[in-house]
Amino acid sequence: SSLNYANEAFDNWQVDAVTVAPYMGSDSVMPFINHTPNEKGVYVLNRTSNPGGKDLQNLQVTDNEKRSPLYMEVARGIVNYNAGSGSVGAVVGATNIAELKDIAAFYADKSIPLLIPGVGSQGGTATEVLSVLRSVGYPVELARVNSSSSLTHPWKKAPVPEDWLEMCEANLRSMIEDTKV
């Protein structure tokens, strides 16, 4: 159950945050939120960076005759989850900058932290992400820009090069420079 997973993550592994999927409803998300210790967090998948994310997340839903993509309905749910705890953030990928912009604009005045994957190997850039966040008034200090693949194995599927450490260090320096606020 979600409560058992939350116990394992926060109590046994003592993680700082977990990522959860909203698609099984509040009964699968709330045990994580209710079990989140102080200074810990729950990031809910909002609009992911993987190509197949559009299959469900971009489906159009109708509410009071207004149509919007499912990821915007999820965003509204994330705001509601956060209202009771203050420990809930959203995972929003950097691979579709227009969607990131719409979601960040929605969250701009709602104190929702963003975890932003998709920078580096998946094609997003930290510079573009921060520019978009600033353009809609989103507080960039709440954004966590993630670029793990380009930092841990930038050679992708090729054999590990001899200068692998230098490649990783160069990408890390570049990421630090690109995300300075």
Image: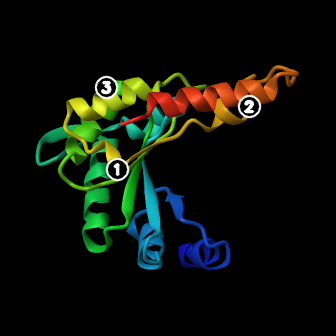
Nearest the eye: 77 or 113: 113
Q: Position of residue 126 (x, y in %)?
A: 45, 29
State the SS at label 3. Answer: helix
Measured along the vertical axis of the image, is residue 120 above or below residue 90?
Answer: above
Cβ atoms under marks 3 and 2 closer than 8 Å:
no
Tell me the CA gap for discs 1 and 2: 27 Å
Q: Is residue 94 left or right of residue 18?
A: left
Tell me the tag on residue 107: none
Task: Say which residue appears at 62% left-offset and 73% top-offset.
Answer: 14
Q: Which residue is mark 3?
A: 98
Tell me the CA gap for discs 3 and 2: 28 Å
Residue 24 visible? The answer is yes
Residue 96 visible? The answer is no
Q: Residue type at mark 3: give it.
A: Ala
Quadrant showing the N terminus:
bottom right
Q: Which residue is mark 2?
A: 153
Which of discs 3 and 2 lies nearer the camera? The answer is 2
Q: Which residue is mark 1?
A: 142
State the SS at label 2. Answer: loop
Whichever of callouts 1 and 2 sits on the residue coming sooner in the sequence is: 1
Whichever of callouts 3 and 1 sits on the residue coming sooner in the sequence is: 3
Q: Is residue 32 left or right of residue 109?
A: right
